[in-house]
Amino acid sequence: MKIFITKRIPQKGIDLLKSAGHDITIHDSPNPLSERELIKACQQADYVLNGGMQKFDAFFFQNCSNLKALSLMSVGYDNVDISAATAQGIPVSNTPGILSGATADVAFLLMLSVSRKAFFNHKRILQGEWKGFDPTAHLGVELNNKTLGIYGLGRIGFELARKAKAAYNMDIIYYNRGRNRDAEQILGAQYVNFDELLTRSDVISLHAALTPETKNRFDKNSFARMKNAAILVNTARGGLVNELDLTEALQTGQLWGAGLDVTDPEPMDPKNPLLTMENVCVLPHIGSATVETRDNMALMAANNILAAIKGEKMPQIINNEVYP
Ligand code: DGY
């Protein structure tokens, strides 16, 4: 079978597909494909493995209706028009679960880095501004016994809450579509409404998918309800946050700090004012970027394709309704 991979992925995933005797083409470039290039490449393929952040919209699926399956090497699938894929009978899979620990690590890293102004202080050394010990300069805040609010308490949110509870005895509150009984029983997490999440949290960490309902959910109205001393952490999708409103809230002191692993758009403009702020730490979407996790993601994405080739249901299917 002809398999097109939209970006180089860890070798383990490629080897697995090759060892099953398939014909692999890889778009081996740091630059994403244009819409036209993507369609052209996918029209010649039976199966596609998406290793990047390519968009697969209705126009794509209408023009690639020959495709037998699309396997995403990501947990998020906001870049795919799932109903358009289903309309063309194309199963789509993702890689849930295996990146939860690594992504929660980055949320924890950002929470702690913002609280201690770590990136800003590192830049001070590079700029020759470390003149000596200063008892009052650039002080951070501590996380012990503070309240962590989780927006979207699924697997990644649970992992972060577990770490925060163990490290700092943080109280966990959460807002979610449904109750997370495990988090309530194991971590003593408390389910709250959205306004309570905003007003009670010292740190709010975002772990929801990007959907029409969650887009720009964190805007000036939300920031106005948050504590002035609060920190916002986003490792989910940049689109959950209105970035201009966030910038203003940080500039006016309405919010204390922000840690972002995702931005809108990506990549972030290097001249973005957020990058110069004392209480802001930004990373370039590295939540799942460990050797172990990326290997597992590549293998899971490859196994989804191999199942589809065998005529089986893809194990991590998103649009189950595509199957009769
Ligand atoms: C994911 O898996 O969704 C990561 O954010 C990478 O896209």
Image: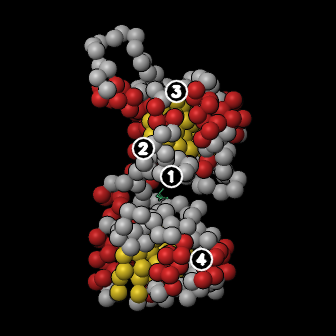
Contact check, label 4 and label 1, Cβ < 8 Å:
no
Of all residues, the one furthest to the top in this rendering is 135
Q: CA distance from mark 3 to mark 4?
A: 47 Å
Q: CA distance from mark 1 to mark 3?
A: 31 Å
Q: Quadrant of the N terminus?
A: bottom left
Q: Quadrant of the C terminus?
A: bottom right
> Label 2 belongs to which residue?
283
Q: Nearer the viewer, mark 1 or mark 3?
A: 1
Counting other residues with Cα less than 10 Å from the Cα at mark 1, is it few (<14), some (14-19), or many (20 or more)? few
Q: Position of residue 125 (x, y in %)?
A: 29, 26
Task: Indicate which disc, 2 or 4, sits on the residue closer to the N terminus.
Answer: 4
Q: What amino acid is labelled 3 in the image?
A: Lys
Q: Position of residue 320 (x, y in %)?
A: 60, 76
Residue located at (36% from left, 54% from top): 289
Task: Indicate which disc, 3 or 2, sits on the residue closer to the N terminus.
Answer: 3
Q: CA distance from mark 2 to mark 4?
A: 30 Å
> Label 1 belongs to which residue?
266
Q: CA distance from mark 4 to mark 1?
A: 21 Å
Contact check, label 1 and label 3, Cβ < 8 Å:
no
Q: Nearer the viewer, residue 313 or 58?
A: 58
Q: Position of residue 271 (x, y in %)?
A: 48, 39
Contact check, label 2 and label 4, Cβ < 8 Å:
no
Asked whether residue 242 appears in the rendered view, the answer is yes
Q: What amino acid is labelled 1 in the image?
A: Glu
Task: Indicate which disc, 4 or 1, sits on the residue closer to the N terminus.
Answer: 4
Q: Nearer the viewer, mark 3 or mark 4?
A: 4
Counting other residues with Cα less than 10 Å from the Cα at mark 3, is it few (<14), some (14-19), or many (20 or more)? some
Vertical position of residue 159 compared to residue 305: above or below: above
Element class at badge 4: helix
Residue located at (41% from left, 82% from top): 3
Q: Where, by quadrant of the figure, is residue 10 drawn?
A: bottom left
